[in-house]
Image (tube, rainbow, N blue to C red):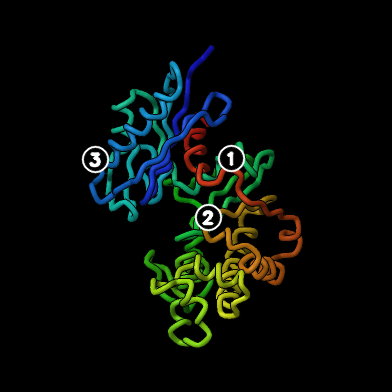
Amino acid sequence: MSNKVYAGIDLGGTKILAVLLDGDGALLTKSEVSTDAQEGSHAVIQRMIDLIHDCLNKIESAELASIGVATAGTLKADEGVVAYASNLGWTNVPLGKELAQAFGVPVNLENDANAAAYGEWAVGAGRGTQDCVYITVSTGIGAGIISGGKLIRGRDSSAGELGHITIDWNGSKCLCGNVGCLELYASGTSIGRRAGQLAAELPEEASLLKDKAAGAPINSRHVAEAAREGDALSLRILKEAGQALGAGMVSIIHSTNPELVIIGGGAASIGAPLFEPMHQAIADRAIGTMATGVKYASPLLGKDAGAIGAALLVNG
């Protein structure tokens, strides 16, 4: 009986998650540590190596076959290099080479949104579909696209930057260099920023939001909590964000023609106050025949999606 296992790592700015899968893609074990990116790339890579060893030690006679890594930023995937990752402070880090030398197995780097999309499509909420989009709404907004049963990577594995689709031609300048990006209006970060602005402009209407924040900067979680209690200002903020998200979704629907859209990420847990205006915007703006057939789902793999997808993609 084969004891081959396949490692997947989700490398985030805050946490590193490692998983081991068997040959059928079933999750065997997982382990997580803090990234502590401020200590530099060598320290982070050593944590990744230690994390894989920790997982291997949990499985008797495990034989590591490959390693897949899901990471944010731009990649030189063919070279195994993280070209630039702002959340880690990395530029041209040869991550794939370091891991391959440590374990002597094939290593593949993948954009984190793409990896999560592949994981959900292969063994999660998108299983059985051929045309599926996974959207993550959290600090930023990203997407992974499965078309005709294949992951759309683009030239350098950076396809699916939904957060940087322009929805306001005359909008604010984004850090990416574009103007009026969706991320500026519908991400968890933008929801918190908008709430802070309105709280300063309308202090009497923002009393519940301020109570939720308890002196800290208002974030999307505070807005969601206040909205659940019927707070009018919070519901207004989420309606605006949902409408913006819907406008971005129309571009995805028109350009990829999916049968299923999976929406994950922290802000996605807000639920109806965000999704109802999103769906209304889609109904108002999208080509009817393209929009009416789209189904929507929540992720099944949760925060494990990126690591699982990365492990599967090495041999996919």
Quadrant position of residue 231: bottom right
The CA distance from mark 2 to mark 3 is 29 Å
Instruction: Give amino acid for label 3.
Output: His
Q: Are marks 2 and 1 in contact (CB under 8 Å)?
A: no
The residue at which mark 2 appears reads as 265
Coordinates of residue 239 in the picture (x, y in percent): 61, 74
User: Can residue 106 be seen in this snapshot?
Assistant: yes
Q: Earlier in the sequence, mark 2 or mark 1?
A: 1
User: Can residue 314 be seen in this snapshot?
Assistant: no
The residue at which mark 1 appears reads as 150
Q: Residues within 10 Å of mark 1 (few under 14, many from 20)?
A: some
Q: Which is more toward the observer, 224 or 301?
A: 224
| Residue drawn at (48%, 47%) of the image | 154
User: Considering only vertical position in the picture, is 103 above or below 168?
Assistant: above
* Left or right: where 167 falls relative to 282: left
Instruction: Give amino acid for label 2.
Output: Gly
| Residue drawn at (64%, 58%) of the image | 253
